Amino acid sequence: MRYLVWSVPITVVAAAFTYWLSTSASSDVGSASKAESSDIQEGALLYADNCASCHGANLEGQPEWRTPGADGRLPAPPHDETGHTWHHPDSLLFDYTKLGGAALLARQGVEYDSGMPGFADVLTDQQIHNILAFIRSTWPDRVREVQAARTEADEQRGDN
């Protein structure tokens, strides 16, 4: 029964998020969603200071990250190859990190507090890019290739 109570809202949020990914217009976060270059070492340090407390020191995420807690939020997902971070283009990862889950989803008409805070007041755009570059650097080659192709397709559509 508990599964049914949570499965409907999660399905609605997942469907809305998937729809948004496939139809989103340009972000008004702007050109900051694309970096010219990145510093992976700085990204590792910034990840440890700002992200590891939720997403794990080894990018492993929180236990049972696919099962919502009592508050309806999903635990922080892993950012290693076992998670879904690599399924998304760079522009979405940047916007989600900068704005936070609730704010980004609200822009698409979805009311859901994912628990992911926005870091716009904590990190510069370049620091966010560095963190994302660090995360990508830990993925196996094949996963990086797939994610890069998704980013390129997103850029060609002009969705970034």
Image (tube, rainbow, N blue to C red):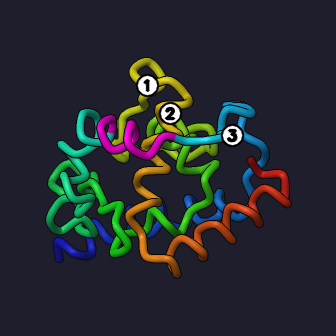
Name the residue at 75% across, 60% down: 154
Mark 3 / mark 2, whichever is N-terminal: 3
Q: In the rendered view, does 157 fall on the left or right side of 123?
A: right
Q: Marks 1/3: CA distance?
A: 17 Å
Q: Within the magenta stretch, is there residue 114?
A: no
Mark 1 / mark 2, whichever is N-terminal: 2
Residue 59 % position (x, y): 27, 58
Q: In the rendered view, does 115 fall on the left or right side of 124?
A: left
Under tag 3, what secondary structure? loop
1 and 2 marks in contact (CB < 8 Å): yes
The type of residue carrying mark 2 is Lys
Name the residue at 68% across, 61% down: 151
Residue 80 % position (x, y): 34, 66
Q: Marks 3/2: CA distance?
A: 17 Å
Region rendered in magenta: 39-46
Determine the residue located farthest toward the bottom in the rendered image. Answer: 142
Q: Is residue 57 above or below residue 120?
A: below
Is residue 102 visible in the rendered image? The answer is no
Q: In the rendered view, does 89 fall on the left or right side of 121?
A: right
Name the residue at 84% across, 52% down: 158
Return the residue at label 3: 36
Mark 1 / mark 3, whichever is N-terminal: 3
Return the residue at label 1: 123
The type of residue carrying mark 3 is Glu
Dot 1: few (<14), some (14–19), or many (≥20) neighbours within 10 Å? some
State which quarter of the image contains the N terminus. bottom left
Return the residue at label 2: 98
Give the label, 1 or 2, closer to the camera. 1
Name the residue at 58% across, 69% down: 147
